[in-house]
Image (cartoon, coloured by chain):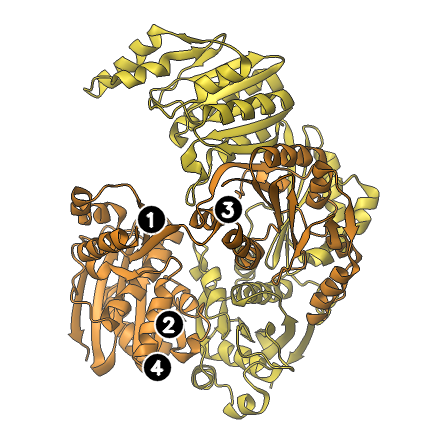
Chain colours: A yellow, B orange
Amino acid sequence: MQAAILAVGSELLGTDRLDTNSLRITESLHRFGVQVRRKCVVGDDVEELATEIGSAHGRYPLLIITGGIGPTSDDLTREAVALALDRELVHQEWIVDDIRAKFARFGREMPDSNRKQADVIEGAEVLANRRGTAPGQRIDHAGGTIFVLPGVPHEVEGLIEHALEPWLESAVGAEAVEVRWMKVACVPESTLEQLIAPYFEEFAADGLSILSKPGEILLQLSGPSGSAEELALRERRLVELLGDAVYGHGRDDTLERTVGELLRDAAATVVTAESCTGGLVAERLTRSPGSSDYFLGAAITYSNELKSDLLGVDPRLIEKHGAVSREVVEAMALGGRTALGGDYCIAISGVAGPGGGTAEKPLGTVDLAVAGPDRKVRYLRVQLPGDRDRIRQQASQWGLDMLRRWLSGAQDPSAAHLAPRAVEVSRVGQ
Amino acid sequence: MQAAILAVGSELLGTDRLDTNSLRITESLHRFGVQVRRKCVVGDDVEELATEIGSAHGRYPLLIITGGIGPTSDDLTREAVALALDRELVHQEWIVDDIRAKFARFGREMPDSNRKQADVIEGAEVLANRRGTAPGQRIDHAGGTIFVLPGVPHEVEGLIEHALEPWLESAVGAEAVEVRWMKVACVPESTLEQLIAPYFEEFAADGLSILSKPGEILLQLSGPSGSAEELALRERRLVELLGDAVYGHGRDDTLERTVGELLRDAAATVVTAESCTGGLVAERLTRSPGSSDYFLGAAITYSNELKSDLLGVDPRLIEKHGAVSREVVEAMALGGRTALGGDYCIAISGVAGPGGGTAEKPLGTVDLAVAGPDRKVRYLRVQLPGDRDRIRQQASQWGLDMLRRWLSGAQDPSAAHLAPRAVEVSRVGQ
């Protein structure tokens, strides 16, 4: 089944509020295998509302409307639905009694304006609203169904539970969708598309969605009830193609949490020595409750003096090679590991901009090193696109991912196919 | 003028993502007096898209579309606009050259899939996208105008600035709405409402909006063209009532940037010594370009050992008073200032949870200290609401705000009316 969602209210067309009810409604619809094809926000204008209702109802068997059923003069959803379906509004006095009783419970008299909340679209079923005054309504019309719900999230929640979901249960059947997730770090979207090209030769593109943000991609496979096996097959193929780049299978997995779990499993600790990321890696690692089990601390060494004072980086190295160099970032990692006493140290130094780029080390050049037991060091230089924020975000992602691959024994230390200019080298430090 | 906004992308029809680009676009439209009448989200389906584009374009003189112009097979906005307007797509090879050059700058080859980003709707003006590969497009058709913009917020921002706003300027005229902003830190919304209650006795509530997020409130005063004087009067009154709590008058002002500017003006430097915030204060301070002028570095001391090793906190202090205590956080600030060599040191230690709370120091207890010249120290304990994320976010906000008030010579050191359980004390450390 396909559905459309309509949120009513001029306040949702301004600069500061979004229609969040639709997320909650969508969640319920998905559970019953109903697909949302369209979401719309229209202001408090009866003609515009009726036009939208008529056209959405004509195209999708299920239309869910939220908002515009309050007591004020700009609450026009009831009128608009009646207009769109060419039905009457029928005043039902028992609803007024009901609303009056609700007011009485708080020692208040019902204002006259609330009387209009008892106007019911001809033929509609009235849906009790236990958390507010205006009841919802359900109308079956021309082979489709329209739900009219309130706009207050808390009241919507109640009506989803007591009216929408029971209806979905009977109309569509039990929970019907299977979903699989894969989280991928440090692979540009266009590279990912190349890597998974064979997938599209073997499977239909349908059911796979790719959501990307800086340094991270979420792959989502979904299918109807009963498709679990098929999805598992598809997932295996994608993991085969993406290899070690897949770091998690939970929708809300984060790289910092994955790294934290690997550290916990290994009974190992981590520290960071950060320059251009300014503490972002440490901040991310400590977002997780319980991170004190594996995170000890960090030295944020923005100035060159602190790189020497806190991390013991030889000032001559900085003078000779610059703060953004393999020599310095490796020294930061090795020195940070010793000074802060962790099993692993992630070190990052780069040109986050907007200034500071040179021909040799342009904006976005980031050197990363991870030092580990036995003074082993891995080094990587990446060239990251975007502005200061994005460069820092991605740099933190690469730093965490280097440690993840080390801890998980990933066999591809070069990452060369992922970012052509990235070269990762393992060696033992002095 | 009236406008509609269309966001394209199946990922915006799921349970976790909302179209936020429309907020930023609406803000620009409002500045030019253009009213948004309708917002819609449609998935990656060329027929559905074309239907929506045709109907919105027919009803509103300005239609702004975001998303669906990437390189993948489900990027269909160009095709859908062409279909809706019955125009051809014309491939323009110079755009391919341009995109290829962008890839080359990062040492990468342009994947073939990006070629489709050079398809231009017949008669459209190509809008340069300095932050991404796909250019935007503007089409005048049947008396209306359609803008096609990317979906990535950062790229949308660039195109709003370089294409949409210049066009609005010429098509609709100079900015038609007056706006004033005030940014307030570390005042709970209910306290703020009490503080500004007299304002509502003197002025109409109309035109003042209050947008709050953890630890920060944005007040926005707006009025029609010509209301500048009236708004300035209202703004003065609000500043009078809120006093030192107002830290900025720019919509995009941030506390970290304000603190940075105060430090630069004072030719002073700052370092941080953080426990529960895990580097968030350092990370925020280094978000600003040029922050190396005043930020030297930080010691993130999550473990008690590092509090002693890096900051010289006497282990007996920690043993006696606990890591979350006035004694320890003051020692962190004084020790951090010496160890890291800054003029000021912000130190934070608190119970961010979810575990670790006690009857005496419940979840959300955060001790903050700032050490400055002549070994002066200011100390503050706050009790912060919310979960781990919100506690950390607010703690970083309080730490920055303590330094802001110190640097700006704010005369209210107690902050007692702002947070009843907050007590700030100045003293000279040993």
- According to the picture, the residue beneath numbered tag 3 turns out to be B20
Q: Nearer the viewer, residue B428 or B65?
A: B65
Query: What residue appears at the point 22 percent right and 80 percent down from the top-left corner?
Result: B375
User: For the residues marked 4 and 1, what is the alpha-carbon distance in whole angstroms?
Assistant: 48 Å
Of marks 2 and 4, the one in the foreground: 4
N-term-proximal mark, 3 vs 1: 3
SS at circle 3: loop
User: For the residues marked 2 and 1, what is the alpha-carbon distance in whole angstroms?
Assistant: 53 Å
SS at circle 4: helix
Asked if marks 4 and 1 touch (Cβ < 8 Å), the reply is no
Q: Place residue A33 in its image quadrant.
A: top right
> Is B120 drawn above or below residue B404 in the view shown?
above
Q: Amino acid at mark 2?
A: Glu
Measuring from the top left, give residue A308's x and y in whole percent.
46, 86
N-term-proximal mark, 3 vs 4: 3
Q: Amino acid at mark 1?
A: Ser
User: For the residues marked 3 and 4, what is the alpha-carbon distance in whole angstroms?
Assistant: 43 Å
N-term-proximal mark, 4 vs 1: 1
- According to the picture, the residue beneath numbered tag 4 turns out to be B339
> Disc 1 sits on a residue from what chain?
B
- According to the picture, the residue beneath numbered tag 2 turns out to be B305
Query: What residue appears at the point 41 percent right and 79 percent down from the top-left corner?
Result: B293
> Is A89 drawn above or below residue A320 in the view shown?
above
